Image: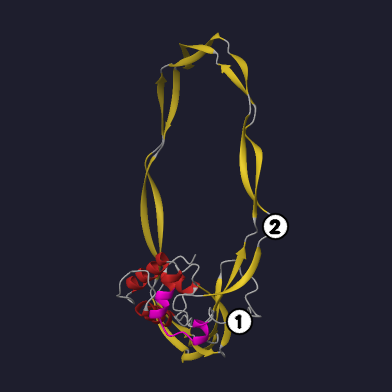
Amino acid sequence: MLKLIAASAALAVAVPAAAMDHRRATPPPPPADAPPHARPGQCFAKLTLPGAAEERRERVLVEEGGVERRELPPRVETERRTVVVRPEQRRTVHLPPVYETVTEQVLVRPGGEQRIVEPAEVRTVVEHVPMGPPRQVWRLVDGPGQPGPVWCLVEEPAPLKTVQRQVVIRPETVRTVVTPPEHRTVQRQMLREPGGVREELVPAETREEVIERVVEPARVEEVRVEPRFKEVVTRTVGPPRSEWVEVLCERNATAARIKAVQRALHREGWYRGPVDGLYGPATSDAVQRFQRARGLPHGGFLSRETLQALGVAFG
């Protein structure tokens, strides 16, 4: 992986001499204002970002109001009336008796229970236990095409010791075997409804008629037209600011992730080179042009925001 990063950095954009020689010279002390909530494995670069944009909105008069004359059509109401075509009547209906088949379960033999004890199963497990808490330190690392130093918070694990212990895989259990009862199904006929005579009401037959009548004649009225405004937005940009930005470094800039970045840039139309996992000049140039088009002022660093905009997993 270090050979891949070194070959990529040789073809990428120019890097300051201090950053290229940081492994040969005495490494500088960790930054005093390092990100306070960093986790082990994360890498950051301190960038100068443009100031925040502010918007001011105000209303501007576009058209003055006035009085407008409008002709209103007559108002017509529709009235519905129900006309009886045939009055309601009564008729006699003869109902036959109704039977249904009922299925019943008859107990032939009752059930029972039997309790069976199964012993526990035990296994010896070998574990490696740390002899102390891990230690977190900041390290100066390399990154693909980085134009400046990158710091990573690294967690160094404690030495391990080997211990053995007995683990119960399956505790002792008591199993109950149930013998179900035996039933037999029988069917018989039951009277559900007796027959008889019933009178039914036949509803009247009606018809709907629609009648229209003028409630209010046509007239002319004056309507006040309110003035029309539009909203004007004024944008201003504040002074630049320094900020720590999380970026890829030699620990997580794998060839597979560089290939994913190259494929995403090719899909977006910014890259036409080979998808080889090497962060060369063509890839670096495509990343910077993509960042400028998306308004990401990260100067060629493979930042978390850049990979999110490309749809590539950061870590």
The kind of residue on which mark 1 rests is Pro
Does the rendering let one see residue 150?
A: yes
Between discs 2 and 1, the one toward the N terminus: 1
- Residue under the image location 36 percent in, 56 percent down: 210
Q: Is residue 187 magenta?
A: no
What is the x, y in percent for residue 124? 62, 37
Q: Nearer the viewer, residue 144 or 287?
A: 144
Does the rendering let one see residue 216?
A: no
Q: Nearer the viewer, residue 253 or 11?
A: 11
The kind of residue on which mark 2 rests is Gly
Quarter of the image for the N terminus: give it. bottom left
Q: Residues within 10 Å of mark 1 (few under 14, many from 20)?
A: few
Q: Which residues are magenta?
A: 6-21
Q: Nearer the viewer, residue 274 or 178?
A: 274
The residue singled out by tag 1 in the image is 28
The residue singled out by tag 2 in the image is 132
What is the x, y in percent for residue 73? 38, 74
Q: Secondary structure at mark 1?
A: loop
* Relative height, residue 44 to residue 173 (above, below): below
Q: Secondary structure at mark 2?
A: loop
What is the x, y in percent for residue 152? 57, 72
Left or right: where 165 falls relative to 60? right
* Relative height, residue 19 to residue 246 (above, below): below
Give the residue at the far top of this rendering: 108
